[in-house]
Image: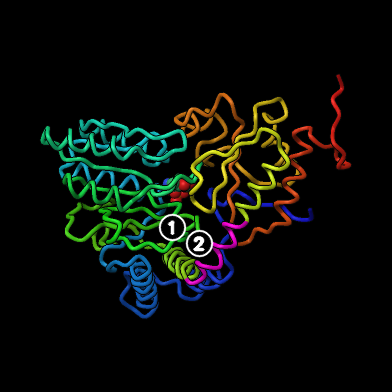
Amino acid sequence: MDHTIYLDNAATTRVDETVLAEMLPYLAQNYGNPSSSYSYGRVARIAVENARRSVAYQLGVKAANIFFTSGGTESNNTAIAAAVRDLGCTHIISSPIEHHAVLHSVEFYSQLHGVPYSMVAVSDAGIVDYDDLERQLKEQAAAGRKCLVSLMHANNETGSLLDVKRVGALCQEHGAIFHSDCVQTVGHYPLNLPEMGVHFISGSGHKFHGPKGTGILYIAPGLTVKPFIHGGGQERNMRAGTECVHGIVGFARALELAMEHYKTESEHIASLKAYMKKQLAANIPGVTFNGPEASLYTVLSVCFPKSEESDNLLLRLDMEGICVSGGSACSGPSGGSHVMRALGKNESCTTIRFSFSKYNTTTEIDHVTEVLKIALGLHTAEGKPATSAC
Ligand SMILES: Cc1ncc(COP(=O)(O)O)c(C=O)c1O
């Protein structure tokens, strides 16, 4: 193909041209500091507060409950730190398939504050065992411990989805604080946060065609949380540091666009996923799919039977100008995926995550399928079935 095929949209996405156009003036002409009282500053302040109002509107909450951050990682860290430091949580319940931005934070703050944590059971497909969660919540409540439950809305590797409302209701029943890492779902689904029963959620702009280094933390009304970065009075004294005005503007515009075009874009992306699944099942013997049938529509996690050829798939695809990942981009090249390990997949599979965006096409998927057939030794480059040498 004449262009690079990008199928790693769960790692990051291309900034939408409209979003970029909206951001640029805040780097060039309107470069004022929002804390300055003169005209340039006022323009920047208005941009930040309009963005906050817009994000809040999209999520069904008040602007006062939205805090701009540097991304999903910071938001996750902040929520977990606040729950144990400021909200009296003395036990943390999470899951082994959370992003490292949650898992490593849980480990760190648990150790720092001497607060134990436990993991909820998950099925082979990555579905949280709600009965186990309820059992753990009851046990901790009976022991007089207040829990923080941190469970992600959608898994970034397998696409498995959490029934957030069910978890929200369980948390409410047992007096627990509920944080959900919604990095893969903000901008991908219309979310109404009060209906979800969450106390904190994290979102990240670069996952839905906004800029990198931008995120939000939602803090539910009525929670009193201490500042998470100390310094000036920005973000209502909660997060010091001059605001990333262009990033905040970009985040809000990207979310507006994503929600405005949600129906057509989600249908397009879901159809690409279904098409690729069908093509792979028809053309690659022994291929299976990770995660449950009903999963995040942007992610298709594929298990290729282990072989010498499948071990080199990522490299072969890269050489052919196809960008995909073996798991989370943040896991780095070594160590494999903790999610796949938790689901017991590492032994039998070479896992490749294909993740789609509004910019992908079926022609790209046809091309990737052909490349896969050649790379796995099923076809020659001339398109003929490969014959065994022995
Ligand atoms: C589920 C999940 N949580 C958190 C993060 C971290 O977000 P950010 O890159 O904005 O720090 C990611 C990004 O890969 C993610 O997929």
Which picture quadrant has residue 196? bottom left
Residue 170 spot, x, y in % from top left: 23, 46
Residue 253 spot, x, y in % from top left: 47, 70
Apparent side of residue 389 relative to residue 174 in the rendered image (left or right): right
Residue 47 spot, x, y in % from top left: 39, 74
The answer to whether marks 1 and 2 mark residues whose Cβ atoms lie closer than 8 Å is yes
Say whether residue 157 is magenta: no
Specify the farthest residue to the bottom.
39
Residue 8 spot, x, y in % from top left: 59, 48
Asked which colour scheme the image uses, the reply is: rainbow
Asked if residue 264 is positioned above or below residue 83 in the image, the reply reads below
Q: Secondary structure at mark 2?
A: loop
Q: What residue did someone put label 1 on? A: 214
Q: Amino acid at mark 1?
A: Thr
Is the CB of mark 1 within 8 Å of ligand 1? yes
Which picture quadrant has residue 41? bottom left
Say whether residue 269 is magenta: yes
Q: Residue at x 35, y 47 (%)?
A: 76
CA–CA distance in space, label 1 to label 2: 8 Å
Q: Residues within 10 Å of mark 2 (few under 14, many from 20)?
A: many
Asked if residue 204 is positioned above or below residue 343 in the image, the reply reads below
**Magenta-highlighted residues:** 260-271
